[in-house]
Image: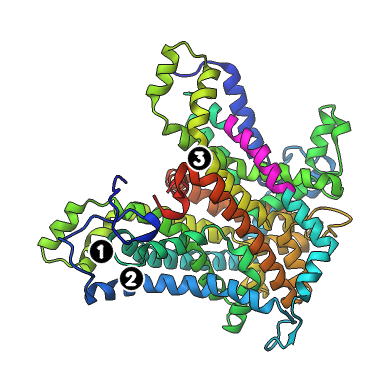
Amino acid sequence: MAVTEQAPGVRGGVPAPPPLRPRRRGIGWAQRLEIAALSGPAILMFLGFVIFPVLMAAYYGFYRWKGFGRPTDFVGLDNYRTILTDGAFHEALWHNGQIVVLSLVLQGPVAVGLALLLNRRMRGQSAVRLLIFVPYVIAEVIAGTAWALLLQTNGAVNDILRSIGLAWLAEDWLADPGLAIWTLMLVLTWKYVGFAVILFLAGMQNIPDELTEAAAVDGASYWQTQRHITLPLLGPTIRIWAFLSIIGSLQLFDLVYIIWGQYVASTAGTSTMATYMVVEGRNAANYGYGNAVAVVLFVISLLIALVYQRFVLRRDTEGALTEGR
Amino acid sequence: MRDRNPAVYAAALALVGLMLGPVVYIILGGFRTNSQITTDPAGLPSPWELGNYTSVLTSDTFWRQVGNSTIAAAATTLGVVTLGVMASYVLARYRFRGRGAMYALFAAGLMFPVTVAITPLYLLVKNLGLVNTLPGVILPQIAFGLPTTIIILVPFLRAIPREIEEAAAIDRCGRLGFFWRMVLPLSVPGLITTGILAFVGSWNSYLLPLFILNDQDTFTLPLGVQAFSSQYSVDTARVLAFTSLSMIPALLFFSLFERRIVGGLTGAVKG
């Protein structure tokens, strides 16, 4: 997209489309009608089913409400007070914090290593790239069901560990609350590392060969080349991946609910803010409270997203994600 | 020059083994009996048992859920791609005040998956009387699919050369005619990419159907897999057969269109 011309008065810095005819002042009614007819349905759907519900959550969150009829029992900030003092929510929040950090420090280096490995010219490269992406494509429900069976105390993972003489490693992977968060990280890494690898590989392929060739001419070893050329140039890709990973970690629901939904999080298994929202809101039919949790989740995600955009993404992309460059 | 370092191949092989292990476990487990699974959880089928797969394939429940998933995914795909390409065309090739804001609106949606909105969204769908119906799942999925679609399609449509549009204008073809006769045919690859992403996303979708669909008859496959695995929790082999059959369409789609999916995802992130 080499179009860089800026239309005056267009905010947000989206590159302007090439002008078709010499510019007139303003646009005609026919064009306005076309714009409305073409973009109207999408905007209406988006406002109706994405923006409107989020706004309604803020409203419902002030009520104690079972979800029938109109909410009438206005309780002010009571729901929020309960959330902020509920130990189970603190636990879920702490888990989300751990998942955010551990996803970055586990998946990031692993994915960079795998991308470096797969970026070498090797036989069967495209097959390997295809296969490591499989976990990302299969449904969370399927991944969760499979891992729940594999990780049972008498499941296949422990069986394999025993048969290769690592019986001391065989554990109660799912129920032990101290271990469950690590089990979850294992499953998450398995499920999502392929996505990171694919992104990083795409980033690496944008690095011109001349740079690595020049480094080789200067006598740089393979590792020196990766350290001083590939990794720095991969920076923007890594930072955008990290953003997606953080947002995904904060809103994690499916896998946790499928594997641990039937456990009581404080005594066994693990939880996240989203599973807390579903258990305390929908499953307990406290819709006012569930909406308040949704608001808290939204605000936390939004704050982190804004801070990250402002301080991390801004310097290299000027918001490629939000401005469509 | 190909790499000849055996360590690289060994590492790649180990990696593939780890990534595919659970998938292979599901598929092979479906060919075993429960007693085989209990006595040797990590073993191979011996002898191969076809009964699990045939019993799933001959059950009405499975095929009804396949039907529901197919309808939901097809309608979502159609809706997302149709609305998405129309809005993307406006964003890519019209200049008007508010275009930046419109783009930012959809791009912001990329940051918030369905999780944060699910509780009020359920109430909205309930007020519309669409609980326990597939449209109750399809309409929100179209809305939540728009951001990715638009972000992938806008650069795509913008890349159509200006000369083609000028030639069309000389031939007295208005902007709408140009959209219909030139843009749509030229953007088929982009439409396929976004369509596949929408289809696979809908096929795998769990949270939204969990809230909206409570009636067994309306279950899509992910709900079905979960219901099946709690209903037949002692019959592990049958659960594995059910699970592996339900992932076939996503895997099939993916292996057929791998390049487009990967290209679309990386394109969406890089913008």
Please tell me if label 2 and label 1 are on a single chain. Answer: no
Residue A103 position, x and y percent, is 67, 43
The kind of residue on which mark 2 rests is Leu
| Horizontal and vertical percent position of residue A211 | 41, 23
**The residue positioned farthest toward the front in the image shown:** A9
Q: Which residue is painted at 39% across and 49% down in the image?
A: A325
Residue sitting at 74 percent across and 57 percent down?
A272
Depth check, mark 3 against mark 1: the one in front is 3
Q: Are marks 2 and 1 in contact (CB under 8 Å)?
A: yes
Is residue B62 among what the camera can see?
Answer: no
- Residue A73 horizontal side relative to residue B186, left or right: right
Q: CA distance from mark 3 to mark 1?
A: 33 Å
- Which residue, given by chain and number where applicable, does mark 3 sit on? A237
Name the disc covering residue A235, or none. Answer: none
In terms of secondary structure, where does tag 2 sit? Answer: helix
Distance CA(mark 2)–CA(mark 3): 33 Å
The type of residue carrying mark 3 is Thr
Residue A280 figure quarter: bottom right
Report which quarter residue B222 is drawn in. bottom right
Magenta range is A98-113
Q: Magenta residues: mostly which secondary structure?
A: helix
User: Which residue is found at the position 68% from the left and 57% from the top?
Assistant: A254
Identify the residue position indicated by label 1 in the image.
B179
The residue pinned by badge 2 equals: A38
Q: Which of the two marks, 2 or 1, is nearer to us in this view?
A: 2
Q: Chain of mark 1?
A: B
Q: Earlier in the sequence, mark 2 or mark 3?
A: 2
Q: What is the secondary structure assignment of the residue under circle 1?
A: helix
